[in-house]
Image: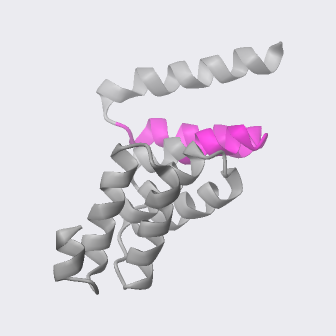
Amino acid sequence: LRAVALAPNSGYVRYELGQVYHQRQDYADAVVTYQEALALGYKAADIYDDLGRALAAQSKWEESAAQFRKAMEISPNDWTIRSRLAQVYWELGQAAQATAELENAVKLAPETQRASLEQMFSEWTSKEKR
């Protein structure tokens, strides 16, 4: 909080404060603080990704998806953002979009991460068949 007092117009400082709230699982305050950072002009894929995660933690799926899409505009080859968007699409019941994003994530992910993404897909399809 001292950093915010010292640099009240710094979007980056607000983003870092949002990170603190996020780590404490105080998702509502994290969302507000991330939005303040954006309003102050801090724009990066990370903030949209973190905002999407904080919204998803509150089951605000549509809002979360919008933030992940913004993150992808900035960083289209980030497999983690694509996998998170896939999860949100799955929660929204949009299986085709979820599958497409997960397939993209698998293509972009390092070899060491592909198995976990493929496992996620396998779990989804087994739930779908029930």
Quadrant housing the N terminus? bottom left
- Point 75% across, 44% down: residue: 92
Residue span colored magenta: 85-109
Q: Does the magenta stretch include residue 81?
A: no
Image location of residue 125, percent across then percent down: 71, 21
Instruction: Looking at the picture, tell me which residue is in the foreground, 112 or 15.
Output: 15
Q: Is residue 92 magenta?
A: yes
Q: How is the image coloured?
A: one colour
Question: In the shown orientation, is residue 109 left or right of residue 92?
Answer: left
Image location of residue 9, percent across then percent down: 28, 87
Image location of residue 3, percent across then percent down: 18, 72
Numbered circles on residues, count: 0
Name the image quarter holding residue 41: bottom left
Question: In the shown orientation, is residue 110 left or right of residue 58?
Answer: left
Quadrant housing the C terminus? top right
Look at the image and tell me whether residue 26 can be seen. Answer: yes
- Magenta segment main secondary structure: helix
Image location of residue 5, percent across then percent down: 22, 79
- Point 68% across, 50% down: residue: 61
Name the image quarter holding residue 87: top right
- Point 27% across, 63% down: residue: 16
Up the image or down, 102 lies above or below 64; here it is: above
Question: In the shown orientation, is residue 3 left or right of residue 53?
Answer: left
Question: In the shown orientation, is residue 100 left or right of residue 105?
Answer: right
Up the image or down, 76 lies above or below 110; here it is: below
Look at the image and tell me whether residue 72 can be seen. Answer: no
- Point 31% across, 35% down: residue: 110
Instruction: Looking at the picture, tell me which residue is in the foreground, 48 or 77.
Output: 48
